[in-house]
Amino acid sequence: MGARAYTGEVKWIKKEYMERTHVFFEKHGGKTIFLARFVPIIRTFAPFVAGASRMPYSFFIRWNIIGGITWVGIFTLLGWFFGNIPFVQKHFELVILVIIVISFVPVVIEAMKARRELRH
């Protein structure tokens, strides 16, 4: 991404938070958009945050398409493979809960890394 300073304002959000978000997206933007595809709630808000932090559209769309294609491929194959296992068929609700919990692992890891970097 280009090294542009954040100059915009968003009502109800402190300018300091927007500047920190902009810096975060400058450093981790592609990885964030890619991984957001795999986390249900984050997937909804990532495009808005990327736009508010002035991520270039061409950069966003590239990583969004790569993430989308990867997500579809992985989950189609996993659905086909695991859908044929009797335990999964019998305990489908439990499997869904485990999938949701696992989907937050990359976000937690990245948040911990970002927090550690901010401290140093």
Image (cartoon, rainbow, N blue to C red):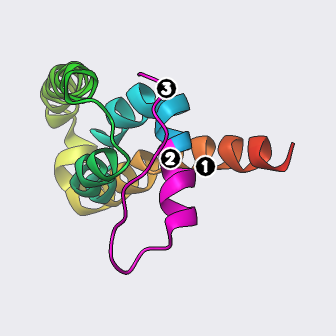
Q: Give the label on residue 107, or none.
A: 2
Name the residue at 48% across, 45% down: 22
Q: Which residues are magenta?
A: 2-22
Which numbered dot is residue 78? none
What separation in Å lies between label 3 and label 1 (alpha carbons)?
22 Å
Q: Where does label 1 land, which residue? A: 111
Of 8 and 59, nearer the camera is 8
| Pointer 3 with pointer 1, Cβ within 8 A | no
Q: Earlier in the sequence, mark 2 or mark 3?
A: 3
Kind of residue indicated by mark 3: Ala
Q: Residue at label 3?
A: 3
Q: How many marks?
A: 3
The alpha-carbon separation of the residues under discs 2 and 1 comes to 6 Å
- Taking 91 as reference, is 120 above or below it? above
Q: Secondary structure at mark 3?
A: loop
Task: Determine the residue positioned at 43% across, 74% down.
Answer: 13
